[in-house]
Amino acid sequence: MVKEVKELRGKSLEELREELEAARTELRNAGIKIITTGRGENMPSIRNLRRRIARILTIMKEKEIGRS
């Protein structure tokens, strides 16, 4: 996780927006898969995706605050 945070902090805001969009799409697809199959096999990965989205949003906010 620490390695992931360091990698995210090294990215520009535009790159972070792209990462955020990709993570949200992946989360949406995982949710649809669970709904259609009725299985909760991906629950840990959904939790991890939600945390990744939160990390990205936090780092984006930090960068925006730092610019102003």
Image (cartoon, grey):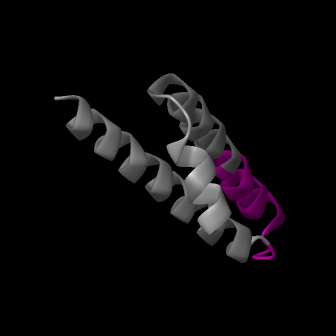
Task: Name the quadrant containing residue 68.
Answer: top left
Residues 66 and 13: in front is: 66
Q: How many labels does the image show?
A: 0
- Is 67 drawn above or below residue 42 in the view shown? above
- Is 3 drawn above or below residue 18 in the view shown? below
Left-right relation of 37 to 64: right
Residues 22 and 14: in front is: 14
Task: Name the quadrant containing residue 11.
Answer: top right
- Let me know if residue 30 is in the magenta part: yes
Left-right relation of 57 to 5: left
Which quadrant would the N terminus be assigned to in this image? bottom right
Left-right relation of 44 to 56: right
Identify the residue at horizontal 73%, vertical 55% (top origin). Answer: 30
Residue placed furthest toward the top: 14
Q: Position of residue 42 (x, y in %)?
A: 77, 70
Q: Where is residue 22 in the image (x, y as percent from the top left)?
A: 65, 37
Residues 6 and 16: in front is: 6
Identify the residue at horizontal 71%, vertical 52% (top origin). Answer: 32
Task: Name the quadrant containing residue 21.
Answer: top right
Identify the residue at horizontal 78%, vertical 56% (top origin). Answer: 33
Left-right relation of 12 to 34: left
- Let me know if residue 2 is in the magenta part: no
Q: Where is residue 9 in the image (x, y as percent from the top left)?
A: 51, 46
User: Residues in magenta?
Assistant: 27-41
Q: Main secondary structure of the magenta part?
A: helix
